[in-house]
Amino acid sequence: MKGLGLLSIIVSVFPAVHMAKVFVYGTLKKGQPNYFRMKDHKNGQAEFVAHARTVDRYPLVIATKDNIPFLLNVPGTGQRVHGEIYRVDQKMLEFLDEFESCPRLYQRTLIRLEVQDGPGGGEHTLESGSSVEAFVYSTDTYEPEWLQKPTYESYNAYGDHGLLYVCREDRRPE
């Protein structure tokens, strides 16, 4: 029974870290302008889990003078959007809320995803083809003309759309 006392001390000193799943589809993906924020430990922990796509179709558009990717919360319209699932701790989730101007610009909601592939072998590996829920930063507040914009299956800041993303540090105040 001595071991149980030590276990309770360890649990109280090192509590279990709750990790949430977050689906990123824009500038936070690998190879995109804000990916470095996902790897910055000052923001919290983020662990890549798998590539995935939305089960429902959504309009992924590029809008504003800063060419920001927006997932419009209009299920059944647009395309099945491709992105990445990350497991994030509470600190990273709070950072992402602030970074995404949640709830003013984006709202964090649960979305159903189809897993495409992952690094495999890990404790948190998701099976290809399985369905999982994760948080996504989408928006309910947008200009009506955004629904007339081209939609994308996958966002790339350097894509052939010619809409150069303006990094947050370079943005002019609204």
Image: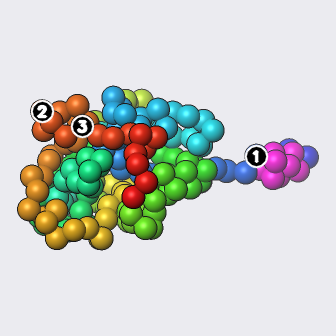
The x and y percentages for residue 27 are 34, 41
How is colour applied across the structure in the image?
A: rainbow
66 lies left or right of 55: right
- Would you name the residue on which mark 1 appears? 14
> Seen in the image, is 94 located left or right of residue 157?
right
Amino acid, disc 3: Leu
Mark 3 Cα shell of 10 Å, populated few (<14), some (14-19), many (≥20): some
* Mark 2 and mark 3: Cα distance apart in space: 10 Å
User: Along the polypeptide, which appears first: circle 2 or circle 1?
Assistant: 1
SS type, badge 2 = loop
Mark whose residue sits in front, 3 or 1:
3
Q: Which element type, helix, strand or loop, lies under badge 1? A: loop
- Residue 164: numbered disc: 3
- Amino acid type at circle 1 is Phe
Q: Amino acid at mark 2?
A: Asp
- Image coords of residue 90 (percent x, y): 59, 53
Q: Is residue 55 left or right of residue 1?
A: left
Can the viewer see residue 7 in this picture? no
On whether residue 79 falls in the magenta region, the answer is no
- Which residue is more in the foreground, 133 or 63? 63
Boundaries of the magenta span: 4-13
Figure quadrant of the C terminus: bottom left
Q: Where does label 2 land, which residue?
A: 160
